[in-house]
Image (spheres, helix red, strand yellow):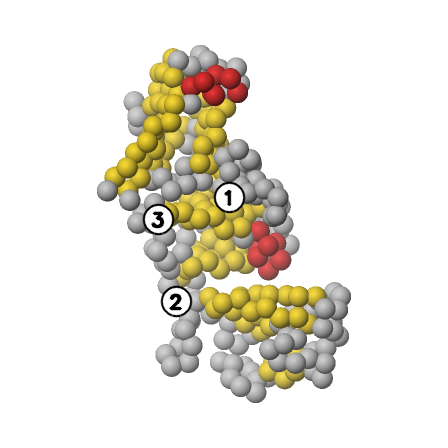
C-alpha cells in the first residue's frame, strides 16, 4: 500500500538557509518551492556523520554532500539547481540524505512530499 | 521501503576490492569521499558454488589472531582446497592462531601482522566471472564503469546478485559508503 507524508520546512529554510532530511526508506519525493527569492541547490549524501561509540548518524549530523540532479516537473529536465520563483522537483533513488540550500533565501513555502510503497 | 548503509572504506583502502551481496535490493548508491584514485564497478551472478562441496558467495567472517608475525603458513594446493593443503608453522594453531583469506579456488592470502597478537579478520570470497556494470553520476547524469572522482553514483535495478568494486592499487579514500534500498 502506498504511503506519503508532507514536510513543511519553510521556517527552517528561511532561518538557516538549508534543510537536510533523511529520505532513506522512501521511494521518491517532490520538493515544492513557492516564491523563492533565489535559486536553490540540491545535494545528497550517504554519510550520516557517524562516529563509532559517539555519534549515531542522522540528518542533523550528515556531511559530505555532493550535487544531485532532480527532475523539474515543469520541463522534465534534470538539474541540481532549482530556479528562483516557483518550482517542483522530483527525486527518486538518490542517497540517504537530501539537502536543499541557498544562503539568504526567503521562500513563501518549502514543502517536501515523500512517497513510498509498503 | 527498507534501506541500509554499508561502510566499505576499510575493504577498499586495504584490499582494493569489496564484494557485496546485493541480491534482493532494488538499487544502490555508492558515495566516494576524498578519493585518490579510480574505482571500477562489476557484478556477477556466479557465486562460485560447487555442488556437494560448498556454497558460493560470501562466507561468514572469520576471526582469528596471529600470535607471532614470523610464523608461516604454506599452501600446497593448486586447485580447490581440501584438507591437508594448508600447512601451519610450528607457532600456529589451526582455527585459533591463523587468519587466512581465500581469494579464489587456488589462492590464499595470509595475514602478516606488524606486531604480535594482532587480530585480523576477512571474508572468504568465491565470487568469480565478474562483468563491468555502469553507474550514473548523480551530479551530471553520466554513465560509466569507472568512478574517477568524488560524488554519488547510482545503479538502479542491478541485474546481478553480487556487486564487486575494485580500486586502483594504492587508492585511498576518506570514506566509501554504499546505500542499499528496496521495496517490500
**Is residue B1 toward the left or the right of residue B17 in the image?**
left
Q: Nearer the viewer, mark 2 or mark 1?
A: 1
The label on residue B121 is none
Q: Residue at x 50, y 51 (%)?
A: B6
Q: Earlier in the sequence, mark 2 or mark 3?
A: 2
Estimate how packed mark 2 is, as few (under 14), some (14 to 19) or many (20 or more) residues with alpha carbons within 10 Å.
some
Q: Nearer the viewer, mark 2 or mark 3?
A: 3
**In the rendered structure, the residue with mark 3 lies on which chain?**
B
Above or below, B79 relative to B5: below
- Residue picked out by circle 3: B182
Residue under mark 1: which chain is it in? B
- Could you confirm whether marks 2 and 1 are on the same chain? yes
Q: Please tell me whether mark 3 sits on a helix, a strand or a loop.
A: strand
Q: Which residue is mark 2?
A: B46
Task: Read off the residue under disc 1.
Answer: B31
Q: With respect to residue B148, does B159 lie above or below?
A: below
Residue A91 in which image quadrant: top left
Amino acid at each position: 500500500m502506498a504511503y506519503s507524508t508532507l514536510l513543511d520546512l519553510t521556517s527552517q529554510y528561511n532561518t538557516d538557509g538549508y534543510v537536510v532530511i533523511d529520505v532513506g526508506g522512501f521511494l521518491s519525493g517532490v520538493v515544492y518551492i513557492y516564491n523563492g527569492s533565489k535559486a536553490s541547490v540540491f545535494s545528497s549524501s550517504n554519510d550520516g556523520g557517524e562516529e563509532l561509540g559517539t555519534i549515531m548518524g542522522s540528518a542533523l549530523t550528515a556531511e559530505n554532500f555532493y550535487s544531485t540532479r532532480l527532475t523539474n516537473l515543469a520541463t522534465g529536465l534534470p538539474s541540481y539547481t532549482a530556479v528562483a520563483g516557483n518550482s517542483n522537483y522530483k527525486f527518486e533513488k538518490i542517497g540517504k540524505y537530501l539537502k536543499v540550500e541557498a544562503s539568504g533565501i526567503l521562500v513563501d513555502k518549502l514543502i517536501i512530499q515523500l512517497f513510498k510503497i509498503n | 521501503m527498507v534501506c541500509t548503509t554499508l561502510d566499505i572504506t576499510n575493504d577498499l583502502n586495504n584490499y582494493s576490492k569489496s564484494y557485496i551481496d546485493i541480491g534482493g535490493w532494488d538499487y544502490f548508491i555508492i558515495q566516494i569521499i576524498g578519493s585518490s584514485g579510480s574505482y571500477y564497478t562489476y557484478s556477477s551472478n556466479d557465486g562460485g558454488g560447487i555442488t556437494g562441496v560448498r556454497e558460493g558467495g560470501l562466507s561468514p567472517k572469520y576471526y582469528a589472531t596471529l600470535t607471532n608475525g614470523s610464523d608461516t603458513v604454506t599452501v600446497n594446493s593448486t586447485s580447490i582446497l581440501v584438507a591437508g593443503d594448508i600447512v601451519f608453522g610450528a607457532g600456529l594453531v589451526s582455527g585459533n592462531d591463523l587468519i587466512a583469506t581465500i581469494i579464489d579456488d587456488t589462492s590464499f592470502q595470509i595475514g602478516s601482522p606488524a606486531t604480535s597478537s594482532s587480530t585480523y579478520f576477512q571474508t572468504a570470497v568465491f565470487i568469480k566471472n565478474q562483468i563491468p556494470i555502469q553507474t550514473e553520476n548523480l551530479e551530471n547524469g553520466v554513465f560509466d564503469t569507472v568512478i574517477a572522482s568524488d560524488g554519488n553514483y547510482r545503479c538502479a535495478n542491478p541485474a546481478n546478485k553480487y556487486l564487486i568494486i575494485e580500486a586502483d592499487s594504492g587508492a585511498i579514500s576518506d570514506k566509501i559508503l554504499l546505500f542499499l534500498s528496496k521495496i517490500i
